Image: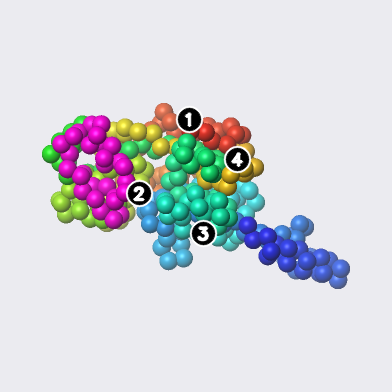
Amino acid sequence: MNLSRAKAKAAACAALLATGVLALSGCSATGSEDTIRIGIKYDQPGLGYQDGRDYTGFDTDVARYVAAELGYSEDQIEWVEAPSANRENMLTNNQVDMIFATYSITEKRLKTVDFAGPYFVAGQDLLVQAENTDITGPESLAGKNLCSVTGSTSAKKIQDKYSSEVQLVQQNSYSDCVVALNAGMVDAVTTDDIILAGLASTKANQGELKLVGNTFSTENYGVGLPKGSDKCAAINAAINKMVDTGAWEEAIKKNVGAANYTYNAELNPPVLTDACATVDAK
């Protein structure tokens, strides 16, 4: 948070108070004009996506709601790109205050960062062409070409646990996997279901692609925080309020509804306590 800016504003407001013109200055009673730095993905349609100066997606909408409940207006949010490989370092090095970026809560990550939430529970699924009826789940991929991104373990998990005869294809991004899927070069794409729904919801892919709808893992998306954070209770309360008011459901529909996506209603929306998340968070 921009504390130096806040201190400067406080000093200016104190000076204005002495002259009696505080009411005309735009200063608040606390003299604070703080900002909050929120890490998001810039390249995941439907979740965290940068389009010029606009930032869209479900993660981004949840972040906005939480920030508002914490007392930050839209123009006090500083969006920061948070690539998957950099997220822990960004939190430990004070580059961001929190991260909303399909950030799964894991035992390994909890050693270096804290998590509020989860605000969504995803599951690994498959994306196929709309007319495909052959692929109904991970067990039906024998002899098929399955795409995932370089470095991801999701496709290998299918090969090891469900279908040893599946042919794995790697691309640099899930968008590249979708291009290959549309061209018939691969038969399916795999990663978390809501990520696939975001890809299928883009204008270019609406009606062309579908999720199989047979998830086979659990991924708890949490709000990444610096280790030792005291913000879990306030963030969890904000997420619960977002659910209770219907804003959470509306954000799902707005961002990935065009894919006819149905989330796992047994696990979503999460109901949160005041505590920071643990590896068994539901």
Q: Which of marks 3 and 4 is nearer the N terminus?
A: 3
Q: Nearer the viewer, residue 255 or 12?
A: 12
Image: magenta residue range: 146-173
Badge number at residue 178: none
Residue that sits furthest to the top in the current view: 266
Q: Residues within 10 Å of mark 2 (few under 14, many from 20)?
A: many
Q: Where is residue 52 in the image (x, y as percent from the top left)?
A: 43, 66
The three-letter code of the residue at mark 3 reads Trp
Q: Where is residue 255 in the image (x, y as percent from the top left)?
A: 40, 49
Element type at marker 1? Answer: loop
Residue 168 highlighted magenta (yes or no):
yes
Tell me the distance, in whole angstroms, between the alpha carbons under discs 2 and 4: 27 Å
Q: Quadrant of the N terminus?
A: bottom right
Tell me the distance, in whole angstroms, between the alpha carbons under discs 1 and 3: 29 Å
Tell me the distance, in whole angstroms, between the alpha carbons under discs 4 and 1: 16 Å
Q: Tell me the residue that label 2 is attached to.
A: 198
Q: Is residue 92 left or right of residue 21?
A: left
The three-letter code of the residue at mark 4 reads Cys
| Color theme of the render | rainbow
Q: Tell me the residue that label 4 is attached to.
A: 232
Identity of the residue drawn at 51% across and 59% down: 79
Q: Where is residue 254 in the image (x, y as percent from the top left)?
A: 41, 48
Q: Which of marks 2 and 4 is nearer the N terminus?
A: 2
Of the residues tagged 1 and 3, which is closer to the observer?
1
The three-letter code of the residue at mark 2 reads Gly
Q: Position of residue 235 (x, y in %)?
A: 59, 42
Element type at marker 3? Answer: strand
Badge number at residue 280: 1
